[in-house]
Every structure is written in structure tokens, then in C-alpha cells.
Image: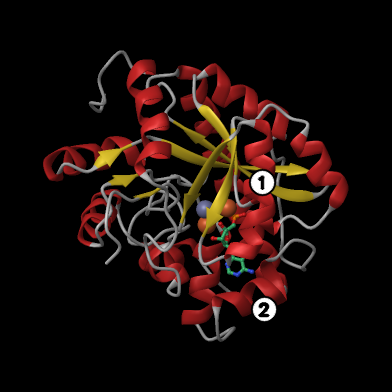
Amino acid sequence: MVEGFRADLHCHSTCSDGTMSPQEIVHYAYEAGLRGLSITDHDTIDAYNEAYPVAAELGMLLIPGVEFSTIHRGVDIHILGYGYDITNKGLHYFCERHSQRRERRLNRMLELLAEHNIIISIDDILELAGEVPKSWGRPHIARVMVQKGYVSSITEAFKKFLARGKSCYCSLRPFSVAETIDIIRQANGKVVLAHPHLLKEKPVINDLLGMDFDGLEGYYNRLGRDQEAPWVKIAESRGWIITGGSDFHGVMKSDVPIGCSWVREDTFNLLYRHFIEVNGGTSAAV
Ligand code: AMP
Ligand code: FE
Ligand code: FE
Ligand code: ZN
């Protein structure tokens, strides 16, 4: 085990497309030796209140987080928000709109799949998911496609049907990068560009680097140091925060263990102190 304080700032719970509940993730992360954590579900901030009591009990430091989906020039861009005001109404409302958008999108994608003779019902998905997530995502569908034998893996489901540009893909009125940054800022959160290494399109990268971010995710998943280095350099040259995390999803991405990427205490404290300040000196769930 690695010595010293480690914090994983990127993981997903059953509130979105992960397979462990927020409470389970906190326990699991603690067992893995992590002492700081942020659960960054897609388009929902619900995990924090569920995870907080367990974290407090264990002595795990928890920062509220989120990973918002946006689209820019036709490319999926994920934006992380950290340490925001957990009572901010604008942020809660924004998540609610995302949740409704995702539910409509799920239904639309099931219709498109049915047109390809792939018959999946909401009940099939619920049976596997166990509970109704706040944010329905394509992995929920992909998992059932594997279970019912339509494809042999989640990756294949995306490759053949669910990825952008494939026959059963649907985005359904996504939000822009600018308005997403605005929402996080108004909630006093830190705005971080998620996994920039995945971006290949130069014009998109140039646009994003001109936007109002506080940091970027320089350490990610099992990325090699050489892939991380250019982004670490960009962040350093701008004085941006360099965050990092695993993007753990439980068995949804079984080859990604929690804590496989992490940040040290200094980076974590920067965000944690900000969070405590914003929330009036308390990290208690409300
Ligand atoms: P959605 O939020 O519905 O747009 O789905 C995006 C999520 O699907 C990502 O956060 C990943 O968890 C997963 N995902 C995206 N692309 C792939 C892929 N090619 N193979 C497996 N999972 C993927
Ligand atoms: Fe995901
Ligand atoms: Fe992401
Ligand atoms: Zn993620």
C-alpha cells in the first residue's frame, strides 16, 4: 500500500452509473487506504448527503463533487465541480433538469433499440440497477444488453449501438459548457475540466483552455505519466489546480479500482478548505 494521505477525487455511485451506493463507496475507499474522497456522479449531487454520515463516522474527509455532461462542437465534455454550497438552489434545480432530460433520453434510446429488435424494458433495467438512479445513463442500458445476450460486453454495446454517432445514440438537449461553468460558479464551487487527455480535437481544446476553469484533471485512471505530463504542464503554467481520481464505477467498469489515481494532501486541502469556507464552517449534511 502507498504511504501517506491519498484522496480519490473522481468516482461514481448508484446515484448515477456506478454500482456501489454512496455509503458503500466510502467504506470501500477507506478499506483501500484512502483518507479523502469526492463522489462525482454524472449530473447529480445526491450522493454527498448519503455518504456524509458514514464518512464522518470513519474519519474519511469528503468533498461534495459532481461531473456535469456538456457538449461543445459536437464533442462530449465533462466538467467537474467541487466544494460548492450544498444548499445552492440553482445547482439543485440544474441537477433536476438534467435528471428529467436523462429520463426522457433513456425512453428515447429504448425506442431506438426496439427499432433494431433489441427489446429492453425499464423493468429489465431496474432489476439490474436495484433502485431508480437520479441520473440514468447509457451504461444502465448497456449492462442489460449484455445480460440479455444482445452483445458480449458493455464496450461492444457502446461500439455498436450507444456511442455518439451510432444508431441508438441520443443526446437530447444537452447543456453548454458556458452555462454549466456558470451554475457551478454561482454555487461557489471550483470548476475543473475532467479527463482532458481524452480530447483529440484541437479547436475544442483551444476553446476550452480559453474558458473560466479553476483547474483540470491531470491525474486520471491508469493513464501513463507521459500522457498526463502535457496537461500537468498546462495547468502549472496557468496556476490551475491539478486534480486526480480513478473514475471508479464499481462493476460497471470492473478493470478500474478505486484509488488507482489520486491526489496528495496539499491538493485535497485546497479544495476541502474552500468547501468548509463556502458552507459556513460545517461539512455536515443538510
Ligand atoms: P451517458 O452519461 O449516458 O452519456 O454515458 C456516459 C458514460 O458511459 C461514461 O461516464 C462512461 O461511464 C460510460 N461509457 C462511455 N463510453 C463508453 C465506452 N465506449 N465503453 C464503456 N463505457 C462507456
Ligand atoms: Fe460514467
Ligand atoms: Fe467523465
Ligand atoms: Zn466520471
Going by the numbered disc 1, the residue's amino acid type is Lys
Q: Tell me the crowding category of disc 2: few under 14, some 14 to 19, or many 20 or more residues within 10 angstroms, Cα based.
A: few
* Residue at image mark 1: 233
- Point out the tag, 1 or 2, that comes first from the N-terminus: 2
Near-viewer residue (48 or 208): 208
Going by the image, does 178 lie left or right of 240?
A: right
| Residue 74, label in figure | none
Residue 286, percent from left and from top: 26, 24
Instruction: Give the foreground label among 1 and 2.
Output: 1
Element assignment for label 1: helix
Residue 247, percent from left and from top: 48, 57
Residue at 27%, 67% in the rendered image: 1
Near-viewer residue (88 or 202): 202
Question: How many angstroms separate mark 1 from mark 2 (CA)?
Answer: 48 Å
Residue 226, percent from left and from top: 64, 64
Going by the numbered disc 2, the residue's amino acid type is Asn
Residue at 63%, 28% in the rendered image: 181
Name above or below for residue 78 compared with residue 130: above
Residue 216, percent from left and from top: 60, 42
| Residue 117, label in figure | 2
Residue at 77%, 68% in the rendered image: 167
